[in-house]
């Protein structure tokens, strides 16, 4: 087991060093699919955060009871229960968002970030640490969705959260809200993230 | 929508990878060599067809008659996980050469969101049994087409001079974007 990190470092690693989207390339499907508008990105981020935090809490508290042969199946059932709660909640209180996200809310269940954190972290760390880790990963995921959806909504419709920001002189780049725009924007952002990483590494050496 | 349109649409227009963004992980992870990509595509098509059948039966014979729709997510994921396990055991026993070819890809398929997405989309769109099966086969072939094309391009990319930070996933995503753009040209095929 690696040496224990301080609580702060445990939280902050999710934001940059181990950011689920930009560094670990996990959870790409929802990242690409729902980021055509900022509001969808935020809703997706929060729903995923809810599921990740509660599943980590449950898995880390019952980790001694789970036989290792069936651990993956157990994690999946725990995750699926929380996803069902999130899905029903969105459908009941925010029907337009639930409709816009479509099958992507139920698909949180196969989001590799969540299963990955249970397997790699919650199953071998204390409840408190797992909670901090889940909070950090969720924040990192929400930030990534926010960044990607802001770029796509601003360039694709000239607006932010539905408010028109750019005047009538701006001709919207329709490609940005199409699937192609999602792939290209994320590709460029990954490149920028690696560039920043290599620059900071070169400086610290 | 007639069956042929549905089939062609699932392969080209509403391609699982390039339109629904499902199955991005294997699309990026297993697309470095053409033959591996083809095996993965075949394994996915196979499991997708079985999942389409199984999830339709669960949904229409058990969940809907008993008013248990809210259990869809839990039951679909369990069906898929056990189905993949079963298929793996069956292939290992019946056809070792096929197991050699598909074996390592099968466990990966459980967490492939394309399979779960197929079950959910078919349930969401209320397809009847035949349509669900056609949709499953078409989507699987669409996934195979996308991943094989991608691996062909990536084999060429190995020789290209890609800027350092974009190497790997970055350039792969940009290529996928251009492919999605090309595939969106097919959208005129269905009205």
Image (spheres, coloured by chain):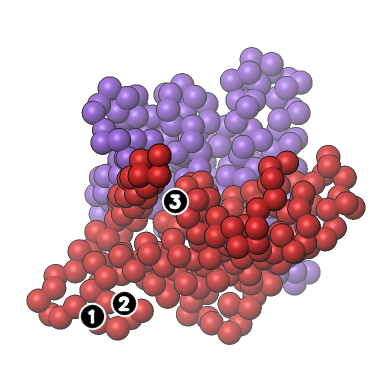
Chain colours: A red, B purple
Within-10-Å neighbours for mark 3: few <14, some 14–19, many 20+: many
Q: Chain of mark 1?
A: A
**Where's the N terminus of chain A, which quadrant?**
top right
Identify the residue shown where x is 44% and y is 31%.
B31
Mark sitting earlier along the chain (3/2): 3
Tell which tag, 3 or 1, sits nearer the viewer.
Answer: 3
* Image height of B109 relative to A96, above or below: above
Discs 2 and 1 share one subunit: yes
| The residue positioned farthest toward the right in the image shown | A65
Mark sitting earlier along the chain (2/1): 2
Relative image position of residue B47 (x, y in whole percent): 61, 38
Q: CA distance from mark 3 to mark 1?
A: 27 Å
- Mark 1 sits on what residue? A165
Q: CA distance from mark 2 to mark 1?
A: 7 Å
Relative image position of residue A71 (x, y in whole percent): 79, 46
Q: Quadrant of residue B12?
A: top left
| Rendered image: mark on residue A160 | 2
Q: Chain of mark 2?
A: A
Using residue B171 as the reference point, say whether residue A52 is left or right of it: right
Identify the residue shown where x is 45% and y is 58%.
A31
């Amino acid at each position: 087991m690696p040496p224990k990190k301080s609580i702060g470092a445990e939280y902050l690693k999710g934001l940059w060093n181990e950011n689920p989207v930009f560094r670990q390339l996990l959870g790409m499907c929802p990242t690409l699919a729902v980021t055509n508008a900022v509001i969808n990105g935020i809703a997706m981020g929060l729903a995923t955060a809810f599921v990740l935090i509660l599943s980590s809490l449950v898995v880390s508290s019952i980790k001694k009871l789970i036989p290792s042969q069936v651990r993956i199946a157990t994690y999946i059932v725990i995750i699926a229960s929380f996803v069902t709660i999130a899905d029903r909640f969105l459908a009941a209180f925010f029907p337009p968002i639930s409709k816009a996200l479509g099958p992507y809310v139920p698909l949180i269940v196969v989001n590799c970030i969540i299963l990955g954190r249970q397997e790699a972290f919650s199953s071998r760390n204390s409840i408190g640490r797992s909670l901090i880790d889940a909070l950090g990963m969720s924040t990192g995921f929400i930030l990534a969705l926010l960044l990607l959806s802001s770029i796509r909504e601003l360039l694709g419709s000239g607006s932010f959260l539905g408010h028109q920001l750019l005047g009538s002189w701006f001709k919207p780049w329709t490609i940005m809200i199409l699937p192609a725009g999602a792939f290209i924007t994320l590709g460029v952002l990954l490149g920028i993230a690696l560039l920043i990483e290599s620059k900071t590494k070169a400086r610290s050496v | 929508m007639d069956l042929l349109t549905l089939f062609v649409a699932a392969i080209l227009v509403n391609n699982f990878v390039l339109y629904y963004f499902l199955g991005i992980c294997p699309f990026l992870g297993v697309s470095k060599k053409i033959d591996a990509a083809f095996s993965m595509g075949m394994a996915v098509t196979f499991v997708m067809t079985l999942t389409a059948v199984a999830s339709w039966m669960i949904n229409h014979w058990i969940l809907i008659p008993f008013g248990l729709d809210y259990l869809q997510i839990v039951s679909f994921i369990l069906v898929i996980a056990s189905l993949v396990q079963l298929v793996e055991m069956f292939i290992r026993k019946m056809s070792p050469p096929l197991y050699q070819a598909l074996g390592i890809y099968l466990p990966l398929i459980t967490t492939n969101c394309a399979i779960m997405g197929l079950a959910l989309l078919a349930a969401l769109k209320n397809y009847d049994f035949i349509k669900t099966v056609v949709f499953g086969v078409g989507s699987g072939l669409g996934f195979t087409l996308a991943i094989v094309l991608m691996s062909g391009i990536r084999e060429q990319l190995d020789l290209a001079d890609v800027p350092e930070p974009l190497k790997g996933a970055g350039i792969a995503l940009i290529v996928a974007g251009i492919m999605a753009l090309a595939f969106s040209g097919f959208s005129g095929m269905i009205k």
